[in-house]
Image (tube, rainbow, N blue to C red):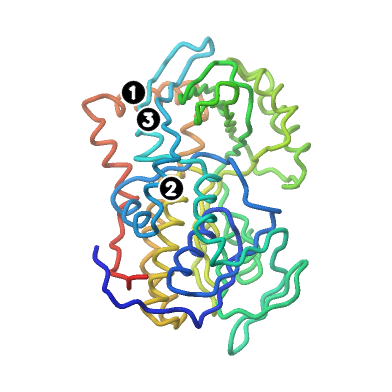
Amino acid sequence: MTNPTNAHSLSHLTVLVSGASVAGPAVALDLARYGARVTVVEKAPGMRAGGFAVDFRGHVHRTVLTAMGIWDEIHARQTHMGRQIVVDADGSPRVDLPSEMMSGDVEIFRGELAQIMYERTRDSVEYVFGDSIATLTETDGGVEVTFEKGAPRRFDLVVGADGLHSNTRRLAFGDESRYLRFFDHYVAGFDIPNDLGLDRTGRVYSEPGRAVALGNYDGDPDRAGALLVFKSEQLTYDRRDIAAQKRILAERFAGMGWEAPKVLKALEQTDELYFDAIAQVHIDRLTKGRVVLLGDAGHGATMGGMGTGVAIVGAYVLAGELALAGGDHRTAFAEYESRIRDFAKGCQKISGNAGPFFAPPTERRIRSRDRMYRLLSSRLLAGFFKKLTEKAATDIELRDYPAA
């Protein structure tokens, strides 16, 4: 990919970005490179540390991250995660999964990635923490925005980069119940003591309909991460009530073998818990007037859909199309949507198996999964599997966007 020498300035454009996880800082970085005046609003009191590890695969991800100027720093902060081993209840190995199978070409904690982009943009982008959008009203000349705390403001464009449960999507497109498709499983994640002495390796244990995965990603000898997955009917719960979520997990994983009792004990003590349905966003369009959805807000999948890679590529395409169109959002949004939609859907498709991969419904299915992954991780098929996992991640042709 080459870049023309003439830059297309967006210095006349004011853009509000909702969300400072990954998609938000990514599009802020890309837009700021073209001179746009960007404000990022985030309901959390600051940048969020930690989170799950995310990975990048193939030449498209590398091209975009290099153009953004962050490829080398991602490599410097990568997890160096090793093998993941599927185990029996006594801890004996069943399947040994190579690192590239789960961790791609390079893997980094979500919080580390967001911090890299924040550090690159904090002097050129306005970040407003501890607030969120209350209302959006489009006019002929822009979008009038009110906030939960701050004073009303007007922006030329609004980017919803606020995740699977996007507030921007709700305000502009309607309630999430119209767009969120449940995939019969829930997932939880939190830190636990590293009692197994893991060192950048992971273990996965499955019983019918539920699974516990433990991993040490950063080499800290005292800390590990726990991932819990279970099959379920759709539950009704308050997403802000951590105590209620802990009770759900305690009930669902009661009596489970291997390290589950220790994990549940650690669950009682944790103050930081991620809990959500395994779900996907399916929406007919990503733009409405001057509002555009990016990343998980427009085509999210809770896990397994390379959502971080899609968000990074989407941010790059959105900013590039705005630059090519000289800030004309009608032209740019139409091009962005046509170029990113099939790519995002292709990545999203592979996430539908995330729940059954961790928590097959029967012992027979568990054995079948193990046989399949034992075959795919063999030396004979290792190259084939790598190409298979990269296919969706590289299934987009990047345009020659103006040099920033």
Rendered image: mark on residue 374: 1
Instruction: Please provide percent x and percent y for residue 96.
Output: 38, 21
Label 1 residue SS: helix
Q: Residues within 10 Å of mark 2 (few under 14, many from 20)?
A: many
> Residue type at mark 3?
Ser
Asked whether the residues under the numbered discs 1 and 2 touch, taking CB atoms below 8 Å apart as contact, a structural biologist would say no
In the foreground, 341 or 80: 80
Q: Residue at x 39, y 23 (%)?
A: 370
Q: Residue at x 69, y 22 (%)?
A: 254
> Which quadrant of the view contains residue 276?
top right
- Of pointers 2 and 3, the one earlier in the residue sequence: 3
> Residue type at mark 2?
Met
> Residue type at mark 1?
Arg
Q: Residue at x 58, y 39 (%)?
A: 185
Q: Which residue is mark 3?
A: 99
Give the spatial CA distance, label 3 vs label 1: 14 Å
Q: Which residue is mark 2?
A: 306
Give the spatial CA distance, label 1 vs label 2: 23 Å
